[in-house]
Image: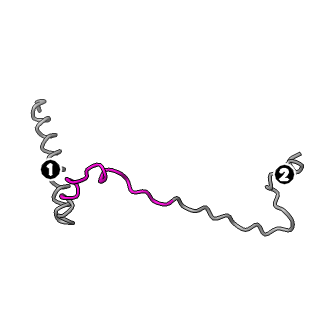
Amino acid sequence: MISATFLEFFALALALTGLGAVISEIVLKDGTLFGEIARDVRAMAEPTRLPAPRRIVPEVFSIGRSANSNDLRKAA
């Protein structure tokens, strides 16, 4: 039977292995990021703002006005 302490040590080892993998990936990709993270942690945690996507309105190819013109006389 597996004891609770063994499972706790296994979970701790798994978490530390994951943390080590993340740190090693940062070092391999760009080692200068550690300085930026240490200098401004709050800015690194903020998501980057992307411009809102523009909505493209399709052209209405019909004679006259479209049926969805919000004209109350057409709704009746």
Query: Which region is colored magenta?
Result: 35-51
Q: Position of residue 52 (x, y in %)?
A: 52, 58
**Quadrant (top left/top right/bottom left/bottom right) for the C terminus:** top right
In the image, taking residue 59 as reference, residue 15 lies left or right, namely left
Q: Label for residue 71?
A: 2
Q: Label for residue 67?
A: none
Q: Secondary structure at mark 1?
A: helix
Which residue is at the front of the view, 40 or 4? Answer: 40
Name the image colouring.
one colour
Q: Is residue 11 magenta?
A: no
Disc 1 vs disc 2: Cβ atoms closer than 8 Å?
Answer: no
Which residue is at the front of the view, 16 or 35? Answer: 35
Q: Residue at 43% of width from left, 57% of height from top?
A: 49
Q: Which residue is mark 1?
A: 17
Q: Secondary structure at mark 2?
A: loop
In the image, residue 7 above or below residue 22:
above
